[in-house]
Image (cartoon, grey):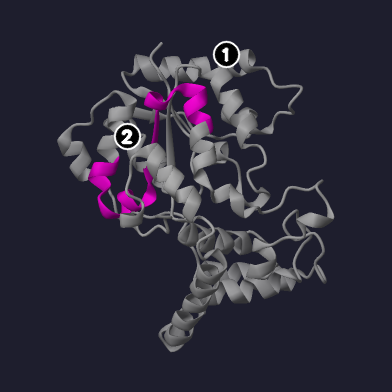
């Protein structure tokens, strides 16, 4: 069998675009999917530590891999959850990496990272969209000192150099490619060509030209909508992200869904308010982040050979 290309994320870093636009048969690559819930890729994340059987998971993948190879395309395992999850501080990233090495020891691994301030703004918006009710500061600085029993957001999750170094150890530096999301935003064609070099299958030039680089999925809601939805979430159902709502009112949940679906607050009449709301959110994240990622970004730049400062990252001298 040929080597599998494994794309582990991160979240909010072009994962959906890669799955829907690049990892399709006409490019020479086939995404093996992530649904239904019984899909083997989910077993890499969900199975309990003492119950995980790497050989059995590999057998579950083999049929999908053989089908791809018989079609003459490179099989691709792509699931952003493989890089951990920001809401829980990436507590299981090392475990997942070790499992991937068991199941796909000869894999080539793609990691897409994103500048932390933009990543945190996008992550916080997603947190609110799926039911979170904490204000920004409480989300970024959860009360972890009170208990070590429940995984919560941990800002160090976005110190990417630790994960990249871990994958270099597991698969070999020459088999791991780490790209900044900003390259995709600036020059999608160059981004795609780097991935094809890693995967070992060149993509015809005419196909590269016809990829829809400006297509965006899972677009984040406006900061104004997020502010309204966060307050409504205090009155919606009890979830893992909202463990203690003030009440559980169906009307609040319906209004929240309606605001997100219709973007009713994003009109010409509220444009200046939305601009100010977005600026306030970004400023709050900028002030909180400051230079806390600068040292990590310097280590990352050295690891992957990319001038991150030129891409707008805060990098220590």
The percent coordinates of residue 214 (x first, y second) are: 30, 55
Residue 59, position in %: x, y? Answer: 57, 13
Please give the residue where the numbered disc 1 appears in the rendered image: 59
Q: Quadrant of residue 215?
A: bottom left
The question of residue 45 being in magenta is answered with no
Q: Nearer the viewer, residue 178 or 304?
A: 304
Query: Magenta part mainly helix, strand or loop?
Result: helix
Residue ID at (38%, 14%): 2
Would residue 252 be seen by someone viewing this image from the given angle? yes
Q: Nearer the viewer, residue 176 or 303?
A: 303
Badge 2 marks a residue whose secondary structure is helix
Task: Based on the picture, tell me whether residue 176 belongs to the magenta stretch.
Answer: yes
View extreme (top): residue: 1
Q: Quadrant of residue 309?
A: bottom left
Tell me what residue is drawn at x 44 percent, y 23 percent. 172
Residue occupied by mark 2: 195
Q: Which residues are magenta?
A: 166-191
Task: Name the quadrant containing residue 96.
Answer: top right
Give residue 307's mark.
none
Decide: is 166 above or below 61.
Answer: below
Circle 1 residues within 10 Å: few <14, some 14–19, many ≥20: few
Residue 159, above or below 76: below
Q: Secondary structure at mark 1?
A: helix
Q: Is residue 178 visible?
A: no
Instruction: Work out how far the residue at label 1 is from the one at label 2, CA to CA, in angstroms.
Output: 26 Å
**Badge 1 or badge 2: first in the primary sequence:** 1
Q: Quadrant of the N terminus?
A: top left
Q: Percent from the top left, x then y, of residue 11?
A: 51, 48
Taking the image as shown, residue 242 lies to the left or right of residue 224, namely: right
Q: Position of residue 9 (x, y in %)?
A: 48, 41
């Amino acid at each position: 069998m040929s080597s599998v290309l494994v794309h582990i994320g991160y979240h909010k870093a072009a994962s959906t675009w890669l799955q829907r636009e690049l990892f399709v048969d006409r490019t020479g690559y086939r995404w093996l999917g992530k649904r239904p819930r019984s899909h083997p890729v989910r077993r890499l994340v969900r199975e309990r530590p003492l119950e995980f059987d790497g050989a059995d998971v590999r057998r579950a993948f083999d049929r999908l891999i053989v089908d791809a190879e018989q079609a003459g395309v490179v099989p691709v395992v792509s699931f952003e959850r493989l890089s951990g999850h920001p809401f829980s501080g990436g507590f299981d990233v090392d475990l997942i990496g070790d499992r991937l090495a068991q199941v796909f020891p000869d894999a080539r691994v793609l990691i897409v990272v994103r500048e932390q301030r933009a990543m945190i703004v996008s992550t916080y918006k997603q947190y609110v969209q799926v039911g979170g009710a904490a204000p920004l500061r409480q989300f970024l600085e959860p009360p972890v000192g009170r208990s070590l029993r429940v995984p919560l957001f941990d800002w160090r999750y976005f110190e990417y150099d630790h994960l990249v170094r871990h994958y270099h150890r597991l698969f070999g530096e020459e088999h791991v490619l780490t790209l900044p999301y900003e390259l995709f935003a600036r020059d999608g064609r160059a981004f795609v060509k780097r991935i094809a070099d890693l995967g070992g299958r060149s993509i015809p030039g005419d196909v590269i030209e016809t990829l829809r680089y400006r297509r965006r999925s899972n677009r984040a809601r406006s900061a104004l909508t997020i502010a309204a939805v966060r307050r409504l979430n205090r009155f919606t159902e009890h979830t893992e992200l909202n463990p203690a709502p003030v009440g559980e009112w169906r009307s609040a949940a319906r209004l929240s869904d309606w605001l997100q679906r219709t973007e009713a607050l994003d009109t010409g009449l509220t444009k200046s308010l939305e601009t100010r709301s977005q600026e306030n959110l970004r400023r709050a994240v900028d002030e909180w982040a400051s230079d806390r990622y600068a040292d990590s970004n310097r280590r990352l730049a050295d690891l992957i050979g990319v001038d991150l400062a030129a891409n707008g990252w805060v990098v220590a001298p």
